[in-house]
Amino acid sequence: MQMPLPSAKVLAEKAFIVKRLRALLPRDSVIDDPAETRAYECDALSAYRCAPLAVVLPRTTAEVAACLKLCHEMGVPVVPRGAGTSLAGGSMPSADAVVLGLARMNRVLEVDYDNRFIRVEAGRTNLSVTGAIEGEGWFYAPDPSSQLACAIAGNIGMNSGGAHCLKYGVTTNNLLGVTLVTMQGEVVEIGGPYCDAGGLDLLGVVCGSEGQLGVVTEATLRILRQPEGARPVLIGFSSNEVAGACVADIIRAGILPVAIEFMDRPCIEATEAFCHAGYPDCEALLIVECEGSPAEIAEQLGLIRKIAMTHDPIDFREAQSPDEAKRIWLGRKSAFGAMGQKGDYMCLDGTIPVSALPMVLRRIGEISQEFGLAVGNVFHAGDGNMHPLIIYNANVPGQQELCERMGAEILKLCVEVGGCLTGEHGVGIEKRDLMTVQFAPADLEAQMRVKDVFDPKWLLNAAKVFPLDVSASRRG
């Protein structure tokens, strides 16, 4: 994966830059020891890594602003970092960059149940947002698979979703406002705890911008009352295509479950070996969850059963207790970790129309045969957010490059059928060179002009998202 050459001027001034940063922050907030900066050399796309110039770990918005203002003055690139769970290389640094980590900014600042919002510092983990309010019967809806570790800042940067996004939407549908610090050190309040802000939709611009426009230090999030009840069903099928057709039929019928999750045989086998969830012996399965009152759940599950039976399922299990419900979800929640038993893998993130699921699943199988690499599929089927896991051996010369070429073909397929390159993982460096597949030169120019306004020197995460040859003149 190509990265721009680091600035020789910045590298030569490392000692002076670190000295000035230490004048702004407590001593334990600046890391420049090469052995310690190694912990920040990559994110969850661990195939690529580079130790940064230095790492800063501010505790307040004012400290973030001071760091950014200094780096802007000295021409030092900055890479914002939440928890480092990005699967697209979104927080991978360059040798001349300062990593600005938000992990110490994790406080709950305000909770307002009457107006249904919570305001938190952006380094707080996703799951701990719900943890702060669930005792009062509330929750925060977006639930990425990495929710135990991932930070709200990263969720905003990548517009993350999760298993329950079919009903509740992704981050942008649950984000009310942010405190944003620009590269020049200006603190800007965007949106707030109300339904809609006047003027330009700057909140919509910031959410999903991958740290290109500013550093989000605080977020106002919509919270919801916990549902009266919820119940999942597990449905096994004889093929991926049949399972995909069942998903399309459920959505076409106008039913809105809270989640529809898909797993195929490689993932089923891996999760069974890992956590023994008791899944059926089948080629593919769906986990469909409905929620509401007992009558609402019964009505929806009855309709889903009727649709599923037209596809001749191998198994149909409806949870009859909380313990059975947990076991149905156990394998799905464990899938990404369990797949590590199969070998190294690359997790993709293309999104497609739900109606195209059967065809795309068939083509992924054909592409797997063409490249000679196995694929496991586990994804949010209800909104067509695909997560093919391409299995390879990083110790075999050429296999990683082969895996990347195969991944590019799958992502091109997603665009060809009317989808897009990413649903929630972001573009980062992983999909950067595929942006021309989805966007025309005029589209990319419009996007880069937005970055010009927020970050004229192109110092924030500048080697991400846009193909390097397209952004070269702006990066200087």
Image: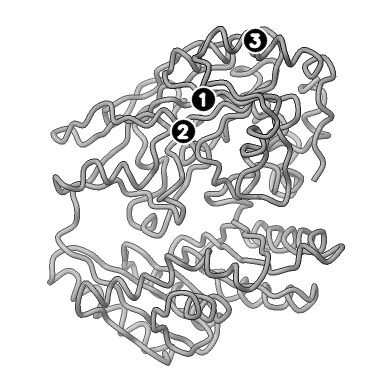
State which quarter of the image contains the C terminus: top right
Residues at circles 2 and 1 in contact by the CB criterion of under 8 Å: yes
Relative side of 278 to 413, left or right: left
**What residue is disc 2 on?**
103
Q: Please state which of residues 10 and 313 is positioned toward the viewer in this rendering.
A: 10
Question: Which label belongs to residue 57?
Answer: 1
Instruction: Name the amino acid type tagged 1.
Output: Leu
Q: Residues within 10 Å of mark 2 (few under 14, many from 20)?
A: many
Question: Which label belongs to residue 389?
Answer: none
**What residue is disc 3 on?**
19
Identify the residue at horizontal 48%, vertical 21% (top origin): 58
Instruction: Name the amino acid type tagged 2.
Output: Ala
Q: Is residue 265 above or below residue 429?
A: below
Q: In the rendering, at what x and y percent does residue 347 appear?
A: 62, 60
Q: Please state which of residues 418 and 357 is positioned toward the viewer in this rendering.
A: 357
SS at circle 2: loop
* Coloration mode: one colour
Q: Residues within 10 Å of mark 1 (few under 14, many from 20)?
A: many
Q: In the rendering, at what x and y percent does residue 103 appear?
A: 46, 33
Relative side of 50 to 302, left or right: right
Q: Is residue 100 above or below residue 13?
A: below
The answer for how far apart the CA atoms under marks 3 and 2 are is 22 Å
